[in-house]
Image (cartoon, rainbow, N blue to C red):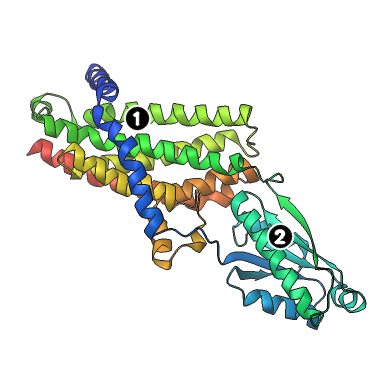
Amino acid sequence: MKPRIVAVLQKEFIHIWRDPYSLLIVFLFPMMMILLYGYAITFDIKYIPLAILDQDRSPASQQLVEKLTSSNYFRITARLQDRRAIEPGFLHRRMSAVLVIPPDFDRRLTSRPETSVQLIMDGANANTAMIAMNYLKSFLTRTTLELNQGLLATPLEIEPRIWYNPDLKSTHFVVPGLIAILMMMICAMLTSLTISRERETGTLEQIFVSPIRPVEIIIGKVAPYILLAFLDAMAILGFSHWVFGVPIRGSLALLVFFMLIYIYASLSLGVFISSRTRTQQAALFAAMLGTLLPSVLLSGFVFPIASMPRVLQWVTYIVPAKYFLIQARGVMLKGVGFDYLYLPTVFLLIFGTLLLAVSVKRFKTNLEG
C-alpha cells in the first residue's frame, strides 16, 4: 500500500509545479471581485450590535437610548445590569460595543452641559470599532444639542476603552483572514483540479485498471495540498507574530487544531467539486465561485456580515471561512478557549464529512463501474 501511495504523491507534486491552469486564478480573481463588490457588498456599516449599560436610569438617559435605537447605525442587542456582563457578551459575540451611561448623567447634564459617557469596543474587528466610534461621536454631538434645546454647548465626551486590540492595528484584524483564504485557496481550489485533470487528460482510465485502491488514490491526491496549506498557514502565523506583533493570546495548540479542522473542511469541498466536474476549467470556475470569493467577501474577513443584505447573510452560514475566522480571532486576539468555539468546530466537521462522503462514494462508483 505504501509504495503505491508514494507514487501517487510524487505524481501529484509534479502536477502542482507544472500546472499552468493555476495561473488563471491571478487573472480571474480580480474580475470576480469587482463583480461582487459592485452588486453584493456595501461599504456602509449599519446595525452594529450595541449593548447599553444604563447606570443612571433617568428620563435623560432613556431619551438618549431611544434616540440611539432609532438610528440605523446601531442595533441594541442587550441591556446590561453591571460591568461583569460585558466580557461574556463580547466572548459570545452578542455585541460589538457597549455604551456606559454614568449614574449622575441626568444631574450633570442639567447642571452643566458637558458630561461624559463611556464606549467600550470589541477591538478584534478594528474596522468596525473605528467606524462605530466615529458614528457614535457624531450621534452624541447632535443629541447633546437637542437635549440642551439647541443652545451652544460642549458635546458629550466619549472615553473609549478598546478591548483585545487597544491600538486598533489592522494587521491584527487581517492576518486571521489571510490564513483562512490561503488555506481555502490551496485546499479547495487546487485540489478541485486533481481528479478533473486526470479525467480530462485520459489518465483516469489507467488508474481505474491499476491495482491501486480508491482510498489510496484519495490519500495520494489530497495529502500534498494538506501539507502545503498547513505549512503556509504556520509560516504566515509565525511571520505575522514575529514581524508585525500579531498576538496569540490563547492556546497555540488549540489554534493548530482549528487549522487542521478547517483544512479538512476545505479539502472536502475541493474533492467534492473535482468529483462533480469533467474539465479543469469547469473545476476552476466552480471552485472560485464556491470557495475563494465567498471566503473573501462573505466570511466577515473585510465586511461585517450584519451590514450585508439579508439574503447574503443567509448565504454566509454555509461559508466555512466564516467559522474559522471566529475561531482564529477568538484564540489569537481574545484568548478564548474551546468552550466558546466548539460550535464552529462542529459545523466544519459536519460540513467536511458530508462532502467527503459524497465525493468518495461517487469516485468509488466510477472506479467499480
In this figure, which residue is indicated by the disc labeled 1?
225
Judge whether residue 293 can be spotted in this image.
Answer: yes
Q: Say which of 238 and 169 sits in front.
A: 169
Quadrant placement of the C terminus: top left
As drawn, the label of residue 86 is 2
**Residue 53 percent coordinates (x, y):** 74, 68
Q: Please, is residue 130 above or below residue 329 in the view?
A: below
On the picture, is 146 further left or further right than 2?
Answer: right
Where is residue 245 shown, x and y percent of the image? 65, 32
Q: Which residue is drawn at 26% across and 19% down?
A: 14
Label 1 crowding class (10 Å Cα cut-off): few <14, some 14-19, many 20+?
many
Q: What element carries label 2?
A: helix
Q: Is residue 199 above or below residue 358?
A: above
Judge by depth and name the residue closer to the eye, 51 or 339.
51
115 vs 249, left or right, is right
Question: Does any portion of residue 360 appear in the rendered image?
Answer: no
Is mark 1 in CB contact (under 8 Å) with mark 2?
no
Alpha carbons under labels 1 and 2: distance apart: 41 Å
Q: Residue 69 carries which label?
A: none
- Toward which corner of the image does residue 78 lie, by quadrant? bottom right
x%, y% of residue 334?
A: 64, 46
How crowded is the residue under tag 2: few (<14 C-alpha within 10 Å), some, or many (20+)?
many
Residue at 76% across, 79% down: 146
Residue type highlighted by circle 2: Ile
- Check disc 1 and give the amino acid type: Tyr
Disc with the residue nearer the chain's start (1 vs 2): 2
Furthest residue toward top? 3
| Quadrant of the image occupied by residue 332 | top right
Which is more toward the observer, 202 or 343? 202
Label 1: which secondary element: helix
